[in-house]
Image (cartoon, grey):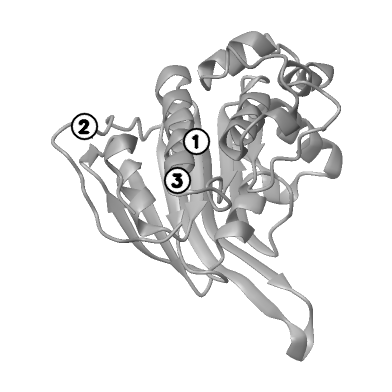
Amino acid sequence: MQTSGRNVTANARPSEPLDRRDPVFHARGLAKIYGEGEAAVRALAGVDLDFFAGELVVLLGASGSGKSTLLNLLGGLDSPTAGTLCYRGRDLATADEAGLTRFRRDAVGFVFQAYNLIPSLTARENVALIGEIARDPMPPEDALALVGLGARLDHFPAQLSGGEQQRVAIARAIAKRPEVLLCDEPTGALDIRTGLTVLDAIERINRELGTLAVIITHNAVIADMAGRVFTLSDGRIVNVRENRTRAPVASLAW
C-alpha cells in the first residue's frame, strides 16, 4: 500500500486523554542485539517508552528500523539483551519461559500480515480455537460480529476475501479478551479498500473494548488514525508525535 497524500477530514475525533499513572508497558534502555562479535546486529539501541490502557499507537519506520523487534519484545516472543521492560509492573526482561507463556496466553493478542487460519475450519471454528487456551474466552460469534463478519460464521477461509480472512484473524486474537493487541503490518498484503476495512476493525476494537492497540507500519498515512505515533530509525525512537485528533479510518488516503 503506497502513500499518495493525506486527507484528514473534519470528522476526526479528539484523542482520549491518557491516564499516565499506571502504564501497561514501561521500557527503559531497551536493547536487542542479534549475533556476536563483528557479526552482531543491534536491532534496538536503547528504547524508552510508556504505553497506556486504551491507546491506539502506531510504530512507524522503514524496514530494518526496529519496529518488529520492538513488537516481538512487547509480546514476549523474544527477550531483550539489555534494559527493562515491564508489563503492569512485572519485568518481562527477567521472566522465565513459563512466565512469558502465561503473559502471551492471558494478556496479548497477535495479528500478523499472514492470516495463519486453518483451511479446513470455518471462521467460527478458527476463532473458537482460542477457547482451548484462554481463561475467559469470548464466544466466537461475538468476536466475529465485532469485526463485521457476523454473517460469515460458517464460511471456510477459501470462501473469504483477503480482508475477511484478516478480520477472522483479528477476531481470533481478541476472543481471549486481551489487554493488548499487537498488529504487525496487518494491511501489508491488502489493497487499499480492503486495508481500510481491516484498520476500521482494529480501531473499533480499540474504542469499544478499551484494548491497547499497537500497529507497526511503514505507511505514514496510517499514523493519522493513532493517538500517538512513535517513529523508529536504526533501532531508536527518533520522534514521538501526539495527535490531538485521531483521523477516522474512512478519511485515510493512499
Report x, y in % for residue 100: 77, 40
Which of the two marks, 1 or 3, is nearer to us in this view? 1
Q: Earlier in the sequence, mark 3 or mark 2?
A: 2
Q: Which residue is mark 3?
A: 50
Q: Which residue is mark 1?
A: 198
Q: Position of residue 192 (x, y in %)?
A: 43, 47
| Residue 121 vertical placement versus 23 (above, below) | above
Q: Secondary structure at mark 2?
A: strand
Q: Is residue 51 above or below residue 68?
A: above
Dot in front, 3 or 2? 2
Residue 85 seen from this side? yes
Q: Amino acid at mark 2?
A: Pro
Instruction: Say whether residue 34 is left or right of residue 30.
Output: right
Q: Secondary structure at mark 1?
A: helix
Quarter occupied by residue 162 = top right
Identity of the residue drawn at 52% across and 56% down = 28
- Label 2 to label 1: alpha-carbon separation: 21 Å
Amino acid type of the residue that numbered disc 1 sits on in the rendered structure: Val
Which residue bears the numbered disc 2? 14
Q: Nearer the viewer, residue 140 or 43?
A: 140
> What kind of residue is marked 3?
Asp
